[in-house]
Image: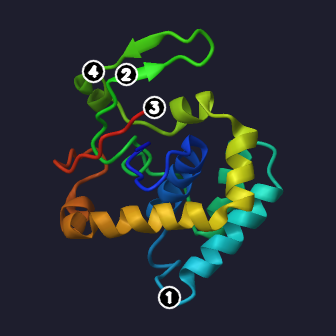
Amino acid sequence: MFYGFEGTRDEHACTGALVVYGLYRSRDVKRFKVTPDMWGIISRAVSGCAFRSIDLWQFVEKMKPKLHVSELNPKWTRVGINPTVSMVVNRETGEVLERGKAHSEQRRQFLTEILETADHEAVLAVLAKKTSLVIALVRDRLEREKPYEAELTKAGEDGVVDVEFEATV
């Protein structure tokens, strides 16, 4: 499981799903409401923006207006809801680094670390060509979070929720 998404071992799909999940959760719920065709709209936007983007940051910028997102909310762009990543592999050196839970809870995450190490071309290819997989991963995670929805929405931007998704990087 990567970044709290189950059902695939494809790290690129999980990275793309994390970006889409962060955008979806950061949307203005008054302007982009849940409708019967909402996931169709999101799916078409993901595919189209991925085809037209040169990197993941450009993808985020193109998706923000489509989902009525003013800025990514760090509450939703963490690795999981309550980060539990303890080991990270440095892709350049192959070195395994340990990150403690206390360190990751002290500061907010804005996808910068994840997208810095991600293979942008591979993730964009998954977003563009395997959009259904990415949307399914996001929807699956949202379904698994439903029992905790009240706690998630009640917690403030910096609030720590006791719902944990183990993340493997």
Residue bearing the label numbered 4? 100
Residue 87 is marked as 2
C-alpha distance separating marks 4 and 1 = 40 Å
Q: Residues within 10 Å of mark 1 (few under 14, many from 20)?
A: few
Q: Are marks 3 and 2 in contact (CB under 8 Å)?
A: yes
Q: Which residue shows up at 74% across the image and 59% down it?
A: 128
The reply to whether discs 2 and 1 touch (Cβ–Cβ < 8 Å) is no
Separation of marks 1 and 3 at Cα, in angstroms: 34 Å
Q: Is residue 50 above or below residue 101?
A: below
Image coloring type: rainbow
Of the two numbered discs 3 and 2 on the same chain, state the one appearing first in sequence.
Answer: 2
The answer to which image quadrant residue 116 occupies is top right
| Residue 92, above or below 88 | above
Mark with earlier residue (1, 3): 1
Q: Of label 2 and label 1, which has the lower sequence position?
A: 1
Q: For the residue marked with disc 3, what is the amino acid?
A: Val
What amino acid is found at the position of numbered circle 4 in the picture?
A: Gly
| Circle on res. 160 | none
Instruction: Label 3: state its secondary structure.
Output: loop
User: Gap in Å between the C-alphas at discs 2 and 1?
Assistant: 39 Å
At label 1, the amino acid type is: Thr
Q: Which residue is label 1 attached to?
A: 35
Labels 2, 4: front one: 2
Separation (CA) of disc 4 from disc 3: 14 Å
Residue 137 appears in view: yes
How far apart in space, not on screen, are marks 3 and 2 (Cα)? Answer: 7 Å
CB atoms of marks 2 and 4 within 8 Å: no
Could you say where residue 35 lies in the image, as x and y percent from the top left?
50, 88
Density class for disc 3 (Cα within 10 Å; few <14, some 14-19, many ≥20) is some
Q: Which structural element holds mark 4?
A: loop
1 or 3: mark nearer the eye: 3
